[in-house]
Image (cartoon, coloured by chain):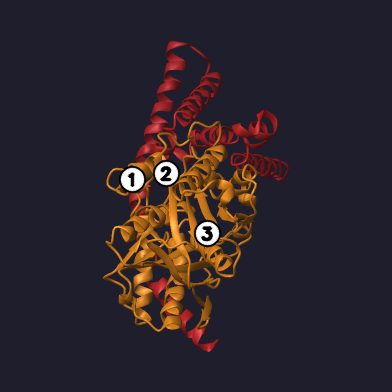
Chain colours: A orange, B red
Amino acid sequence: MKKIGENSIEFDKVYLKSTGVVAGPLEGKGPLSSYFDYIYEHEHCGCKNWEKAEMILLSDAIDYATTKAGLNKTDIDLYIGGDLNNQLAANNYVMRNIEVPFLGVYSACSTLTAGIIVGSTFLESGYGENIVTMTSSHNATSERQFRYPTEYGGQKPETMTFTISGAGATVLSKDKAIVKITKATIGKVIDLKQTDVQDMGRAMAPAAALTLKQHLLDFNILPNEYDLIVTGDLSKYGKNIFIKILRELNINVEKNYEDCGLMVYDKENNNVFAGGSGCGCSTLVTLGYLYNAIKTGKYHRILVIATGALHNPIMIAQKESIPCIAHAIVLERC
Amino acid sequence: MEKRIDEYKIIDNVLEKNKPKRNYVKNALKAFIVGGVVSLIAQGFLLIFVKIFSFDDSTSKSLMSVTMVVIASILTGFGIFDKIGQFSGAGTYIPITGFANSMTSSALESKSEGLVLGIMTNMFKLAGAVIVAGIVSASLSALIIYLVEIIG
């Protein structure tokens, strides 16, 4: 492992041994459903409240990931995870049942890549053989956390995103596997004074663009180095702005770029506004679809730039703007 | 640092040029039509209470409001109101139906936190603003009327 350029890391030996992906009902109706390990038929996942439902999603994802890696949950050296609830509730409450060291990370909807970067760094610095990273989000818990009650009848604008109900876990390992995590770029907090929390793609697009620019600069490569570049949850409007910003910065990604928020849902038949968002968004796409696409050889090298809006509802009420961040990781077939 | 400021200027420019357009005319028209329909239904109830049940005027008006609140609350409970609200916007949000929805949805949302600390504490979370605004403006207008009467 070594630092490259200003913000980047190159890993020597970090493999993505297995993933576990569990989704909610609406996500299960989308085009990527065949890549999920389990799909719950109801948003409640058989639980009494939304928070418990999110915990079930998360603990199931951990079960799938560890089982597929042929490991017991206690064989893992370290768990690293985060979600969108206050105090990372879903992760902390799930981890009380697994007696293994745990580190909570919060990076809003970019927690997936933040967790994988931290996990890979731990692994490379010699902390054990297997590390689990995980994230979860639930539409109803994050609506409660950041927006209005779920049944509230206010009108949402077209730019609004729809928080994904889903969770994913990875087993990062020193053992050789098909998918390898080779590079990462850690994002800076970028705040261009955007204040509309109903248009977060717009606020996050600059952070994603600057992380991509820094990544290309640090490794001295062009975007066509990658078969596919995905951003986390910029949604329909943010995606557009992302492309336009990059065009101004003389970076062309139009051929090999997609946004996870636009890949999860069946947008024709479900009203999800501008697309999916939340920790689960980049998680379901990356650990479900993209992981399998690399495994089967459809893609060889993918850059995942998960994007997060780091705002706090109280600070927004105090007329603050939305600080954003984007962390990038590279998945490679080897 | 200077390079970064230049980049910010370029990005700001792109953000400025790509502001989302909200269709105010279409939204206002939808709100007008749905709001009108809601009022029409309420008027229908008022007529029923006056003509068929022969209640006096003020009782009928109260009953009409209560009926609309009950209907909005039941629709909220069945998860239908938020879908109507998404279409109509201010059309269902401004009438008493919006008030009922804000209370019922808050109550439903906080049910898992218990009866007292959950439902009872949170019920007025959104509706509280309407009540405060109502009481303050009523007091102010009463004061103005009183002063005008004294002077007049």
Q: Are marks 2 and 3 in contact (CB under 8 Å)?
A: no
On the image, the x and y values in percent for residue B138 come to 65, 40
In the image, B89 versus A301, the foreground residue is A301
Disc 3 marks a residue whose amino acid type is: Thr
Element assignment for label 1: helix
Q: Which mark is residue A23?
A: 2
Q: Is residue A75 visible?
A: yes
In which quarter of the view is residue A215 placed? bottom left
Quarter the C terminus of chain A occupies: bottom left
Q: Are marks 1 and 2 in contact (CB under 8 Å)?
A: yes
Would residue B43 be found to the left or right of residue B70 on screen? left
Residue type, numbered disc 2:
Ala
- The circle on residue A33 is 1
Crowd class of label 2 (few under 14; some 14 to 19; many from 20; radius 10 Å) = many
Whole-percent x, y for residue B116 in the image:
69, 30
Taking the image as shown, residue A199 lies to the left or right of residue A147, namely left
Measure the alpha-carbon separation of dots 3 and 1: 22 Å
Task: Look at the picture and state if A154 lies above or below A226.
Answer: above
Q: Which residue is mark 3?
A: A111
Q: Quadrant of residue A283?
A: bottom left
CA separation, marks 2 and 3?
17 Å
Judging from the image, mark 3 belongs to the subunit labelled: A
Judging from the image, mark 2 belongs to the subunit labelled: A
**Farthest top residue in view:** B53
Residue A196 in view here: no
Q: CA distance from mark 1 to mark 2?
A: 8 Å
Q: Earlier in the sequence, mark 2 or mark 3?
A: 2
Mark 3 vs mark 1: which is more N-terminal?
1
The quadrant in which residue B103 appears is: top right
Q: Nearer the viewer, residue A308 or A304?
A: A304
The amino acid sitting under disc 1 is Ser
